[in-house]
Image: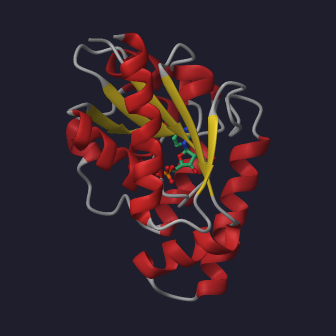
Protein backbone atom coordinates (compact mmCIF):
# COMPACT_ATOMS: atom_id res chain seq x y z
CA UNK A 1 0.00 0.00 0.00
CA UNK A 2 1.24 3.50 -0.86
CA UNK A 3 -0.05 5.88 1.81
CA UNK A 4 1.61 9.14 2.85
CA UNK A 5 0.91 11.14 5.98
CA UNK A 6 2.33 14.67 5.68
CA UNK A 7 2.74 16.48 8.99
CA UNK A 8 3.87 20.09 8.73
CA UNK A 9 4.02 22.98 11.16
CA UNK A 10 6.27 25.37 13.07
CA UNK A 11 9.06 24.47 15.49
CA UNK A 12 8.16 22.46 18.61
CA UNK A 13 4.44 22.16 17.78
CA UNK A 14 4.45 18.42 18.50
CA UNK A 15 4.98 17.14 14.95
CA UNK A 16 7.75 14.74 15.92
CA UNK A 17 5.85 13.20 18.83
CA UNK A 18 2.66 12.79 16.79
CA UNK A 19 4.56 11.43 13.78
CA UNK A 20 6.46 8.81 15.76
CA UNK A 21 3.30 7.69 17.56
CA UNK A 22 1.10 7.32 14.47
CA UNK A 23 3.91 5.70 12.46
CA UNK A 24 4.22 3.06 15.20
CA UNK A 25 0.44 2.59 15.44
CA UNK A 26 -0.07 2.09 11.70
CA UNK A 27 3.24 0.33 11.00
CA UNK A 28 4.40 3.13 8.69
CA UNK A 29 8.00 4.27 8.19
CA UNK A 30 8.82 7.70 9.66
CA UNK A 31 11.13 10.42 8.35
CA UNK A 32 11.92 13.54 10.40
CA UNK A 33 12.86 15.81 7.49
CA UNK A 34 14.10 18.56 9.84
CA UNK A 35 17.00 16.26 10.61
CA UNK A 36 18.16 16.51 6.96
CA UNK A 37 18.40 20.31 7.19
CA UNK A 38 19.96 20.12 10.66
CA UNK A 39 22.64 17.75 9.32
CA UNK A 40 23.37 20.06 6.37
CA UNK A 41 23.70 23.06 8.69
CA UNK A 42 25.91 21.17 11.15
CA UNK A 43 28.22 19.81 8.46
CA UNK A 44 29.66 23.25 7.72
CA UNK A 45 31.44 24.22 4.51
CA UNK A 46 29.40 24.75 1.35
CA UNK A 47 25.76 23.89 2.26
CA UNK A 48 24.82 22.89 -1.28
CA UNK A 49 27.69 20.40 -1.43
CA UNK A 50 26.79 19.21 2.09
CA UNK A 51 23.19 18.53 0.97
CA UNK A 52 24.36 16.72 -2.17
CA UNK A 53 26.69 14.44 -0.20
CA UNK A 54 24.64 13.87 2.96
CA UNK A 55 25.45 10.48 4.53
CA UNK A 56 23.97 8.28 7.26
CA UNK A 57 26.88 9.31 9.50
CA UNK A 58 25.90 13.00 9.06
CA UNK A 59 22.36 12.15 10.15
CA UNK A 60 23.62 10.28 13.23
CA UNK A 61 25.55 13.22 14.72
CA UNK A 62 24.68 13.64 18.40
CA UNK A 63 24.51 17.46 18.24
CA UNK A 64 21.64 17.86 15.77
CA UNK A 65 18.92 18.59 18.36
CA UNK A 66 20.45 21.74 19.85
CA UNK A 67 18.96 25.24 19.44
CA UNK A 68 22.07 26.25 17.49
CA UNK A 69 21.59 23.34 15.06
CA UNK A 70 17.97 24.43 14.57
CA UNK A 71 19.02 27.96 13.71
CA UNK A 72 21.74 26.74 11.33
CA UNK A 73 19.17 24.41 9.71
CA UNK A 74 16.69 27.21 9.08
CA UNK A 75 19.44 29.32 7.47
CA UNK A 76 20.56 26.63 5.01
CA UNK A 77 16.90 25.74 4.39
CA UNK A 78 16.42 29.10 2.62
CA UNK A 79 18.87 28.06 -0.16
CA UNK A 80 16.94 26.67 -3.17
CA UNK A 81 19.80 24.36 -4.26
CA UNK A 82 19.95 22.82 -0.77
CA UNK A 83 16.22 22.08 -0.86
CA UNK A 84 16.44 20.74 -4.41
CA UNK A 85 19.20 18.31 -3.40
CA UNK A 86 16.94 16.79 -0.72
CA UNK A 87 13.71 16.46 -2.73
CA UNK A 88 14.25 13.11 -4.46
CA UNK A 89 15.12 11.28 -1.25
CA UNK A 90 12.07 12.66 0.56
CA UNK A 91 9.69 11.94 -2.35
CA UNK A 92 10.91 8.36 -2.64
CA UNK A 93 10.51 7.91 1.10
CA UNK A 94 6.98 9.33 0.99
CA UNK A 95 5.80 6.96 -1.74
CA UNK A 96 7.57 3.84 -0.49
CA UNK A 97 5.57 0.64 -0.22
CA UNK A 98 4.01 0.10 3.23
CA UNK A 99 3.11 3.68 4.17
CA UNK A 100 5.15 6.62 5.40
CA UNK A 101 4.85 9.55 7.78
CA UNK A 102 7.02 12.59 7.05
CA UNK A 103 7.18 15.63 9.27
CA UNK A 104 8.59 18.99 8.24
CA UNK A 105 7.57 22.34 6.81
CA UNK A 106 6.76 21.66 3.14
CA UNK A 107 5.73 18.01 2.97
CA UNK A 108 2.07 18.65 2.06
CA UNK A 109 2.82 21.67 -0.12
CA UNK A 110 5.96 20.69 -2.07
CA UNK A 111 7.38 17.24 -1.32
CA UNK A 112 4.18 15.24 -1.51
CA UNK A 113 1.12 17.29 -2.54
CA UNK A 114 -0.64 13.99 -3.30
CA UNK A 115 -0.31 12.80 0.34
CA UNK A 116 -3.40 10.89 1.47
CA UNK A 117 -3.44 12.75 4.81
CA UNK A 118 -2.12 16.26 5.45
CA UNK A 119 -1.97 17.70 8.93
CA UNK A 120 -0.73 21.13 9.92
CA UNK A 121 0.21 20.89 13.59
CA UNK A 122 0.58 24.19 15.40
CA UNK A 123 0.41 25.80 18.86
CA UNK A 124 0.98 29.29 20.27
CA UNK A 125 4.60 30.47 20.27
CA UNK A 126 4.59 30.59 24.08
CA UNK A 127 3.40 27.00 24.43
CA UNK A 128 5.88 25.77 21.83
CA UNK A 129 8.78 27.64 23.45
CA UNK A 130 7.83 26.24 26.85
CA UNK A 131 7.83 22.68 25.50
CA UNK A 132 11.19 23.19 23.80
CA UNK A 133 12.60 24.76 26.99
CA UNK A 134 11.55 21.67 28.98
CA UNK A 135 13.71 19.64 26.57
CA UNK A 136 16.77 21.87 26.21
CA UNK A 137 16.74 23.97 29.43
CA UNK A 138 18.54 27.31 29.64
CA UNK A 139 16.80 30.70 29.55
CA UNK A 140 13.12 30.34 28.57
CA UNK A 141 12.89 33.89 27.17
CA UNK A 142 15.86 33.11 24.93
CA UNK A 143 14.20 29.89 23.74
CA UNK A 144 11.03 31.86 22.90
CA UNK A 145 13.05 34.46 20.97
CA UNK A 146 14.76 31.70 18.96
CA UNK A 147 11.47 29.92 18.21
CA UNK A 148 9.94 33.19 16.95
CA UNK A 149 13.03 34.03 14.87
CA UNK A 150 13.09 30.57 13.27
CA UNK A 151 9.34 30.61 12.50
CA UNK A 152 9.68 34.01 10.87
CA UNK A 153 12.58 32.86 8.69
CA UNK A 154 10.74 29.65 7.74
CA UNK A 155 7.48 31.45 6.92
CA UNK A 156 9.01 34.34 4.99
CA UNK A 157 11.49 32.49 2.79
CA UNK A 158 10.87 32.53 -0.95
CA UNK A 159 11.16 28.77 -1.57
CA UNK A 160 8.81 26.28 0.10
CA UNK A 161 7.77 28.61 2.94
CA UNK A 162 6.07 27.27 6.05
CA UNK A 163 2.30 27.36 5.43
CA UNK A 164 -0.58 24.92 5.59
CA UNK A 165 -1.51 23.18 2.34
CA UNK A 166 -5.00 24.34 1.28
CA UNK A 167 -6.34 20.85 1.99
CA UNK A 168 -4.48 20.30 5.28
CA UNK A 169 -6.34 19.75 8.52
CA UNK A 170 -5.08 22.26 11.09
CA UNK A 171 -4.48 20.78 14.54
CA UNK A 172 -3.80 23.38 17.23
CA UNK A 173 -2.20 21.50 20.14
CA UNK A 174 -1.90 24.53 22.49
CA UNK A 175 -4.57 23.18 24.82
CA UNK A 176 -4.13 19.48 24.09
CA UNK A 177 -2.26 16.76 25.92
CA UNK A 178 0.09 14.58 23.89
CA UNK A 179 -2.48 11.76 24.04
CA UNK A 180 -5.27 14.01 22.74
CA UNK A 181 -3.13 15.28 19.86
CA UNK A 182 -2.00 11.76 18.89
CA UNK A 183 -5.61 10.52 19.11
CA UNK A 184 -6.86 13.32 16.85
CA UNK A 185 -4.18 12.53 14.24
CA UNK A 186 -4.84 8.80 14.49
CA UNK A 187 -8.58 9.32 13.93
CA UNK A 188 -7.98 11.32 10.74
CA UNK A 189 -5.59 8.70 9.35
CA UNK A 190 -7.88 5.79 10.29
CA UNK A 191 -10.85 7.50 8.62
CA UNK A 192 -8.85 8.02 5.41
CA UNK A 193 -7.67 4.41 5.34
CA UNK A 194 -11.24 3.29 5.97
CA UNK A 195 -12.48 5.48 3.13
CA UNK A 196 -10.06 3.85 0.68
CA UNK A 197 -10.98 0.29 1.42
O1 LIG B 1 11.72 20.39 12.36
P1 LIG B 1 13.05 20.95 12.81
O2 LIG B 1 12.94 21.95 13.91
O3 LIG B 1 14.05 19.87 13.10
O4 LIG B 1 13.60 21.73 11.51
C1 LIG B 1 14.78 22.50 11.54
C2 LIG B 1 14.71 23.52 10.41
O5 LIG B 1 14.82 22.86 9.16
C3 LIG B 1 13.41 24.32 10.33
O6 LIG B 1 13.41 25.48 11.13
C4 LIG B 1 13.31 24.65 8.84
O7 LIG B 1 14.02 25.82 8.54
C5 LIG B 1 14.03 23.50 8.17
N1 LIG B 1 13.10 22.55 7.55
C6 LIG B 1 12.59 22.86 6.31
N2 LIG B 1 11.78 21.97 5.66
C7 LIG B 1 11.47 20.80 6.23
C8 LIG B 1 11.95 20.49 7.53
C9 LIG B 1 12.76 21.39 8.17
O8 LIG B 1 12.85 23.92 5.78
N3 LIG B 1 10.70 19.94 5.56
**Residue at x 51% of width, y 74% of height:** 131
Question: x%, y% of residue 53?
Answer: 34, 28
Image quadrant in which the C terminus is located: top left
In the picture shown, does residue 191 fall above or below 8? Answer: above
**Which of 58/117 is in front?**
117
**Residue at x 68% of width, y 74% of height:** 126
> For this view, does 17 lie left or right of residue 139?
left
Question: x%, y% of residue 108?
Answer: 57, 26
In the picture shown, does residue 26 fall above or below 129? Answer: above
Find the residue positioned furthest to the bottom: 139
**Residue at x 73% of width, y 50% of height:** 153
Work out whether residue 131 can be spotted: yes
Question: x%, y% of residue 187?
Answer: 43, 39
In the picture shown, does residue 92 fall above or below 65? Answer: above
> For this view, does 179 lie left or right of residue 15?
left
**Which of 178/43 is in front?**
178
**Residue at x 33% of width, y 21% of height:** 93
Image quadrant in which the N terminus is located: top left
Amino acid sequence: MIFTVAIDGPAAAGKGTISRAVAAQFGFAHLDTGLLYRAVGAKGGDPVRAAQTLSDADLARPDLRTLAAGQAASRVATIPEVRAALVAFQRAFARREGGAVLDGRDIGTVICPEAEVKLYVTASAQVRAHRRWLEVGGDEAQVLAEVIERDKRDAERAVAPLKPAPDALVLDTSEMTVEEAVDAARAVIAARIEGRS
